[in-house]
Structure formats: structure tokens, C-alpha cells
Image (cartoon, rainbow, N blue to C red):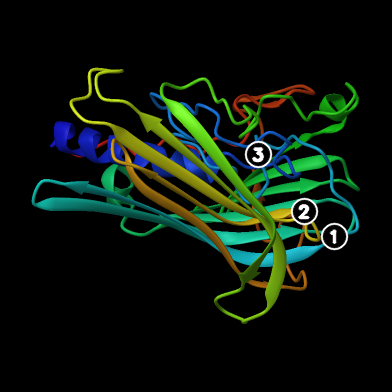
């Protein structure tokens, strides 16, 4: 039973990577976004920029562009006579002062199946209070830590985070980049259209370059709104890892609270160092141990 749970857990790792890479804000930099991710190579292999929000609680603060939206991240891996589909859903929001909110719901599969229901976590960066909050909705608890020390170091947007590798991302093969800065994205839920920059990176790995019998074609595409300073949709297709889609819908005015609900219990201590925040900020708690 343990080995089965472990295998299921490994299948969730790419999805968790998509859900956890959250925090910093801003557009893809000039030069493309086809960097080598944590996988063996290819445009954004194993890592999405999460709606333009990258990193734990860090990142450039975007003011004057509030929004709230739902998001869906879906990964499909096709196997011989089988397929694996994992979906992460949630809510993204940004306040006018640059505070951010993300509510992430993980599917109750693999190591999380023993919980009996989807696991939900909320990550809040409150700019006015200079506080960050990590909320475990299922347990009704939260942790807090100051962001003042981190921000005082001169900004926490680190070059190289997210898809910052440029058109030549460092992976094997040859890349081509196409860019349409006047494209349109239509919100599937509301039908509202937004002007976006539609950028596509295609990488071709010739046969034999990494031991492959035939050539491998990997594609990534991103629809970025400068008006919202937000990535509205992102897709990745890699025969080695499957197909992944990140999509924002139901864009509208902000209604969420950027402070924990008073009914939640504050949890002290643990992994929170003085003035440093949680080690590995943005990471989710470990899943429950597998059952024998």
C-alpha cells in the first residue's frame, strides 16, 4: 500500500509545482519565456508562472490593478492504454495596494486521499500590515509572519525566477518564438475580452540528441494582459510529461479579505524563524502518512 501511495504522490508533484509557484507579479520579460524548468528541459518543463505570480510570498508589488478570478490548472499524462488527469482549482485576487490572495484546492488523491476530502490552503500577502499568512482551511488554523525584513532588503523580485530564461532556455534542441502583442483573450465564464500578448515557444529536440529515437516537439504558449499585469492562460505540451493548462476565468472585482478570518486559530512556533518567515515559504504542508 505504501508503494502505491508513493507512486500516486509522485504523479501529483508536477501539479503541486504549478500550484505552489505563486507570489511575485509582473509580465514575462523581453526575450521569451521558454526557460528550462525543474524537469529535464523544454519550455517551462514542470513549472508554470502562476498567473504572473511567481515565488512564495515574495515578488514585485503591483498597485492600482485589483482583480479577483478563479483559476484551474489541469495536467493530463497519456500512458499506453491509460491516462492520468490531475486538477488544481482555486481563487486568485489582488488588492489595489498590491496585497495578494490565493486559495488553492488540491484533489483528494494519492497521499492526500486518506483525508477523505480535497485539501484547501490560502496564502495571503498583506502589504499594508506587512504580514504574510498561510491558512489551512481544513484544520481551521493559520500561521503568520512579518514580511518587513524581506522587503527591507530592497525588493524581493529575484531575476531568474519563473520563465525568465529568454528564448534560449538552456534545454536541449532548437527553439522558435512567435509573438502576437495584439491578440485577444475571451473570459470563458463572462465573455469579456482582454487585449493580450500571445507568445508561443516551440522547441524541437532532434532524434538522438538525448537518446530519443525520434524528434520531440515541445510547445508552450502564454496569453499575458498588460492592463491587468496578469497571465490569463498558459499551456504546455511535452510528450515526455503530458499536457498542462493554466486558465483564469470569472475576472471581476475583489471581494475576498486579505486578513485571516477571526474564527481561525493562530498556530505559533513550528517552522517559523524570527523575521524570516516560514522556511520554504509557499510550500504546502506534507501529506498524511500512507496507510498500511
Front position in the image: 144 or 255: 255
Q: How busy is the neighbourhood of tag 3: few (under 14 within 10 Å), some, or many (20 plus)?
A: many
The residue that appears at 29% across and 54% down in the rendered structure is 85
**Neighbours of disc 1 within 10 Å: few (<14), some (14-19), many (20+):** some
Q: Report, in whole angstroms, how far the alpha carbon at label 2 lies from the one at label 3.
A: 13 Å
Of labels 2 and 1, earlier in sequence is 1
Could one spot residue 15 in this view of the protein? yes
Q: Which residue is tagged 2?
A: 229
Residue 192 lies, in percent from the top left, at 67, 79
Which of the 4 image quadrants contains residue 262?
Answer: bottom right
Element type where label 1 sits in the image? loop
- Residue 108 seen in the current view: no
Q: CA separation, marks 1 and 3? A: 17 Å
Residue 159, horizontal then vertical, whole percent? 73, 24
Quick one: 177 or 127, which is closer to the camera? 177
> Where is 288 relative to 123, above or below?
above
Q: How many marks?
A: 3
Residue ID for mark 1 = 65
Which is more N-terminal, label 3 or label 2?
Answer: 3
Residue 99: % across, % down = 81, 51
Query: Which element is circle 2 on?
Result: loop
Q: In percent of the image, x 80 and y 23: which residue is there?
A: 275
Is 208 left or right of 130, judged from the image as shown? left
Q: Which mark is residue 55?
A: none
Q: Residue at x 73, y 36 (%)?
A: 30
In the rendered structure, the answer to whether residue 292 lies left or right of residue 19 reads left
Q: Are marks 2 and 3 in contact (CB under 8 Å)?
A: no
- The residue tagged 3 is 54
For the residues labelled 2 and 1, say whether their Cβ atoms are less than 8 Å apart. yes
Work out whether residue 20 or residue 213 is closer to the camera in this orientation and state it: 213
Q: Is residue 124 left or right of residue 118?
A: right
Amino acid at each position: 500500500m505504501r508503494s502505491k501511495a508513493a507512486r500516486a504522490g509522485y504523479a501529483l508533484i508536477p501539479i503541486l509545482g504549478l500550484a505552489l509557484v505563486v507570489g511575485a507579479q509582473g509580465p514575462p520579460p523581453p526575450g521569451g519565456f521558454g526557460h528550462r524548468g525543474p524537469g529535464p528541459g523544454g519550455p517551462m518543463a514542470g513549472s508554470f508562472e502562476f498567473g504572473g505570480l511567481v515565488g512564495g510570498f515574495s515578488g514585485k508589488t503591483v498597485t492600482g490593478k485589483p482583480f479577483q478570478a478563479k483559476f484551474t490548472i489541469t495536467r493530463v499524462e497519456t500512458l499506453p492504454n491509460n491516462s492520468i488527469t490531475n486538477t488544481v482549482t482555486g481563487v486568485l485576487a489582488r488588492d489595489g495596494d498590491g496585497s495578494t490572495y490565493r486559495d488553492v484546492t488540491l484533489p483528494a488523491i494519492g497521499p492526500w486521499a486518506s483525508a477523505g476530502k480535497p485539501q484547501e490552503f490560502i496564502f495571503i500577502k498583506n502589504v499594508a500590515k506587512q504580514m504574510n499568512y498561510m491558512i489551512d482551511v481544513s484544520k481551521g488554523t493559520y500561521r503568520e509572519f512579518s514580511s518587513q525584513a524581506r522587503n527591507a532588503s530592497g525588493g524581493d523580485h529575484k531575476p531568474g525566477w519563473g520563465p525568465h530564461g529568454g528564448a534560449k532556455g538552456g534545454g536541449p534542441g532548437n527553439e522558435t518564438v512567435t509573438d502576437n502583442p495584439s491578440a485577444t483573450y475571451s473570459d470563458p465564464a463572462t465573455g469579456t475580452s482582454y487585449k493580450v500578448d500571445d507568445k508561443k515557444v516551440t522547441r524541437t529536440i532532434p532524434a538522438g540528441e538525448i537518446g530519443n529515437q525520434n524528434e520531440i516537439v515541445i510547445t508552450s504558449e502564454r496569453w499575458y494582459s498588460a492592463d491587468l499585469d496578469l497571465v490569463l492562460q498558459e499551456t504546455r505540451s511535452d510528450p515526455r510529461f503530458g499536457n498542462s493548462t493554466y486558465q483564469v476565468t470569472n475576472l471581476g472585482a475583489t471581494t475576498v479579505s486579505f486578513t485571516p478570518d477571526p474564527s481561525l486559530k493562530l498556530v505559533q512556533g513550528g517552522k517559523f524563524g524570527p523575521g524570516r518567515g516560514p522556511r520554504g515559504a509557499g510550500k504546502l504542508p506534507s501529506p498524511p502518512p500512507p496507510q498500511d
